[in-house]
Each structure stands twice: as structure tokens, then as C-alpha cells.
Image (cartoon, helix red, strand yellow):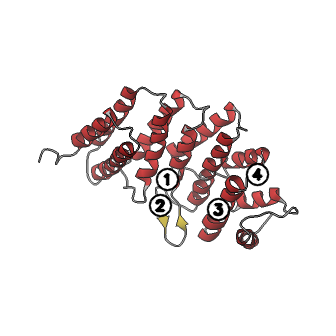
């Protein structure tokens, strides 16, 4: 097994060669080392080398086999990956969880391009990802000295790619919408690192699937107002209102740019007005 120093040296050399593997490369050992150190507190190793290594090997070079990607997926969906110390409010475990989660988009995109996962395996991704979204308590974005945590943003990216899988039908799309609204409607902090836009992206993917009735999406939008007005006391009310306002405004403009607004645009503006005490001034 690679130490962090050995892995960093190895990946730096591969990066300098555009991640071109030699015929003698032991890819299984390399992947195992990358997974073992995916939560490194060294942001260069974690972000620039391990994650970018996975991106290059899975997406650009397409040298990782279906069996190897299934091995990676099993590690992601385990207590060594997405569920490592899941539920702790803050701690270094966030880096393992967040960057394990960020592998899901790479694996799901590869699957959509050339299917290799069974329906059962896609549903395992759905089960694990929704669990992670429900139970993640660390909302930090950028952590000084350690780099990006950003678990909620990474989960949003994975939800986007999950929503685009043909195996995912209307029942799972509804679950995704439910969890998106729940993770937006938190009242203990305000997202400040672009999480609102990232969480809009799976919603756009769901709308593009055109599997859910428009009136159902309208009701989902309107439900945000009730979540806000149900919270009393300060600063909790301001926190949840800020999160919902940022999310709905991002959704409004993204729908317009995608030419998908229509009744949804009206529902969003009505919802924002309903929860804003200054709307009548």
C-alpha cells in the first residue's frame, strides 16, 4: 500500500505525463492507494492529484474497467467512503465522505455512456446517496488550511447524475426532490459556497426527464414557503429564509435560461413573495 508521500510522488509523475499509464502500471494497486487516501488533509493530494487522477482515468482515458469501477463503487458506498463518520457535525472525516461522494458522478457518467451497472446496483447508489444527504451534518465549504469539504455540493453533483440515469424513474425523482428541499431548508447555518446553484442542477435534470407532472413540481416549489414560516426565533428564521431565497432565486433564473419556466416561474415568485415580510412595501 502506498504511503501518502509515495502516492503523491506517484500521482505527480503521472500528472506530468497527462496520466498516461505505462504497460507495467499496476492499476489495481494505484486505485486502492487513491481510495485509501481520498480523505487526505493535504488539499493538493486530495483535490489536484487523487480526484483529478480519477477524473482522467475514468473520463478522459477510460482505462478503468467495469469491474474496477464496481470495486470503487463498493468502497464509496461503505463505512470507508461516504459513510465514514457520517453524522459528526464537524471533523476531518468530512473530506473522506465528500470526495468519495464526488466519485459517484464519474462512475454514473461512465455507466450512462456504456452501461455496466445493474438496476439493483443503481438503486444501491440511490439508497446510499440519499442516506448521505439526509444524515450529513457538516455544512462547511472551504476549510482554511485543508481546502474544500463541500459535502452538500458534491452530493448535489451526484444527485444530478443519478437523476439522469434511465434506470431512475418517477418514484426516485420524487425522493430526490424531497431530499433537495430538506437539505435547502436548514436553519442552523447559511450556505455560502455556491451550494444553492449546485442543488438546483439535479432539479433541472429532473425537469428535463419530463416524468413528473408540472403541477406536482409547482406544489413542491410552493412547499418551501411553509418550511420557512414554520421556523420561529432568530437567527434560525433568517438562516432558513436566506437558504430558501438563494435556492429559489437560482432556480428561477436557471429555469429561464433553460426555457423551462412557465408556471414554475410564477410559483417561485409567489413563494418568495409569501415568505418575504417586505413584499408589500
Please, what secondary structure does the residue beneath circle 1 have? helix
| 4 or 2: tag closer to the N-terminus | 4
- Give me the C-alpha separation between circle 4 and circle 2: 30 Å
Disc number for residue 52: 3
The reply to whether the C-beta atoms of the residues labelled 2 and 3 are less than 8 Å apart is: no
Please, what secondary structure does the residue beneath circle 3 have? helix
- Left or right: where 82 falls relative to 220: right
- Left or right: where 108 falls relative to 219: right
Q: How crowded is mark 1: few (under 14 residues within 10 Å), some or many (20 or more)?
A: many
The reply to whether the C-beta atoms of the residues labelled 2 and 1 are less than 8 Å apart is: yes
Disc number for residue 153: 1
- Give me the C-alpha separation between circle 1 and circle 3: 17 Å
Q: Which-is-in-front pick, marks 2 and 1?
A: 1
Question: From what the image shows, is residue 128 above or below residue 246?
Answer: above
Percent position (x, y) of residue 50? 67, 63
Percent position (x, y) of residue 173? 50, 33
The reply to whether the C-beta atoms of the residues labelled 3 and 4 are less than 8 Å apart is: no
Q: Which of 237 and 19 is in front in this view?
A: 19
Percent position (x, y) of residue 145? 53, 73
| 3 or 4: tag closer to the N-terminus | 3
Question: From what the image shows, is residue 44 above or below residue 277?
Answer: below
| Residue position for label 4 | 64
Amino acid at each position: 500500500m502506498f504511503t501518502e508521500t509515495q502516492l503523491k510522488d506517484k500521482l505527480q509523475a503521472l500528472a506530468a505525463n497527462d496520466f498516461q499509464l505505462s504497460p507495467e502500471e499496476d492499476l489495481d494497486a494505484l486505485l486502492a492507494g487513491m481510495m485509501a487516501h481520498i480523505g487526505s488533509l493535504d488539499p493538493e493530494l486530495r483535490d489536484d492529484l487523487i480526484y483529478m487522477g480519477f477524473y482522467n482515468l475514468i473520463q478522459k482515458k477510460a482505462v478503468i474497467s467495469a469491474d474496477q469501477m464496481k470495486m470503487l463503487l463498493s468502497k464509496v458506498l461503505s463505512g470507508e467512503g461516504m459513510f465514514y463518520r457520517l453524522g459528526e457535525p464537524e471533523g476531518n472525516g468530512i473530506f473522506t465522505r465528500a470526495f468519495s461522494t464526488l466519485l459517484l458522478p464519474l462512475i454514473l457518467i461512465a455507466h450512462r455512456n456504456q452501461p455496466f451497472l445493474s438496476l439493483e446496483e443503481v438503486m444501491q447508489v440511490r439508497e446510499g446517496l440519499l442516506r448521505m444527504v439526509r444524515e450529513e451534518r457538516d455544512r462547511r465549504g472551504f476549510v482554511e488550511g485543508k481546502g474544500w469539504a463541500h459535502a452538500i455540493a458534491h452530493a448535489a453533483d451526484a444527485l444530478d447524475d443519478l437523476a439522469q440515469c434511465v434506470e431512475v424513474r418517477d418514484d426516485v425523482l420524487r425522493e430526490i426532490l424531497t431530499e433537495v428541499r430538506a437539505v435547502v431548508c436548514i436553519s442552523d447555518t447559511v450556505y455560502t459556497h455556491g451550494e444553492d446553484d449546485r442543488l438546483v442542477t439535479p432539479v433541472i435534470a429532473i425537469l428535463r426527464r419530463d416524468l413528473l407532472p408540472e403541477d406536482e413540481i409547482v406544489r413542491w416549489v410552493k412547499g418551501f414557503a411553509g418550511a420557512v414560516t414554520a421556523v420561529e426565533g432568530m437567527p434560525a428564521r433568517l438562516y432558513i429564509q436566506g437558504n430558501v431565497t438563494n435556492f429559489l432565486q437560482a432556480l428561477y433564473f436557471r429555469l429561464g435560461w433553460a426555457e423551462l419556466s412557465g408556471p414554475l416561474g410564477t410559483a417561485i415568485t409567489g413563494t418568495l413573495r409569501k415568505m418575504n415580510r417586505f413584499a408589500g412595501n
